[in-house]
Amino acid sequence: MPFDYCMETGLIMRLLDLSYADPCRNLALDEVLLEGVAAGSAPDTLRFWESPAVFVVIGSSQQVHLAVHESNCLCDGVPILRRCSAGGAVLQGPGSLNFALALSYEHFPETAFLHASYDFILGSVTAALHRLGMRVGRQGISDLAIGGMKCSGNAQRRKRNACLHHGTLLYRVEPGLMGRYLQEPEDRPDYRGVRSHDEFVQAAAVAPARLREVIREAFCPEAVPETLLPAEEADVERLVLEKYSSREWNYRR
């Protein structure tokens, strides 16, 4: 059977461990997964990815000039891209493992409402990380933290019958890099206070293979990585050309 079949629930869930060298393709694929689940043409899916190249990704409603140090990004050749979900600016690259869940409300009724969805998904992720001995806990609406220092940020895009939840799990952080490319946010969770990026963020210091393992066990324990359908590959290429490589999209605000 190509997808994970849960005997208790009867649900089929697909596992993808697929990273592109092109940052635009990584963002496009997350949106393709959501659209496929929402249309009923693809199963609920858990995807892992990690960019080999550093880039900045901003939330769907953010303004580039308020979220990013554009001159530093331009000087260093760091792309600035916009994702399809809400939330704040994030630095992507080696050391940042991403997980994305495209889930239908029919199969996962816990995700039908925003706050309940975060409770269900981040509760499952937190329990998984506890099995690694990590003293991680929820902070704010969508963060995970160790000792009050953020190790995971999460965001969602929601449709009528499905949602995309994607989050980062930092297992390595290069000091000073976030501060060079990301401005200090105006909208801060209370637990952050006035701390800078370097003072606020902490790596999980766990091998990415172990992070993948426990997250997979939390959502699709019997699954093995699969490949995309040809139609999905074509949709990724279309979205890259029409949207994610477009300045009109990335600088639309």
Image (cartoon, rainbow, N blue to C red):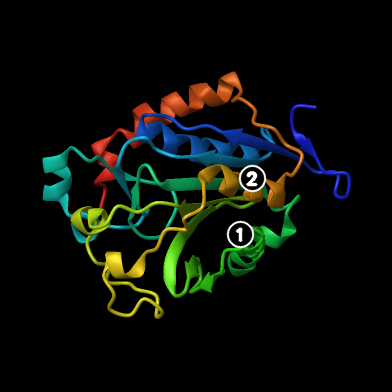
- Tell me: residue 193, above or below residue 146: below
Identify residue for label 2: 213
- Tell me: residue 229, above or below residue 59: above
Name the foreground residue: 190 vs 243: 190
x and y percent of residue 223 in the render?
A: 72, 36
- Residue positioned 75% across, 51% down in the render: 106
Indicate left or right for 224 with 49 as reference: right
User: Which of the 4 image quadrants contains residue 127?
Assistant: bottom right
Q: Residue furthest right?
A: 7
Indicate left or right for 163 with 28 as reference: right
- Tell me: residue 252, above or below residue 40: below
Residue 186 is labelled as none
Quarter of the figure that contains the N terminus: top right
- Tell me: residue 228, above or below residue 42: above
Name the foreground residue: 214 vs 11: 214
- Residue positioned 34% across, 73% down in the render: 188
SS assignment at label 2: helix
- Residue positioned 66% across, 45% down in the render: 216
Indicate left or right for 162 with 92 as reference: right
Identify residue for label 1: 129
x and y percent of residue 209 in the render?
A: 56, 42
Indicate left or right for 83 with 12 as reference: left
SS assignment at label 1: helix
Give the number of callouts.
2
Q: Amino acid at mark 1?
A: Leu
Q: Amino acid at mark 2?
A: Glu
x and y percent of residue 169 in the render?
A: 48, 53
Name the foreground residue: 226 vs 136: 136
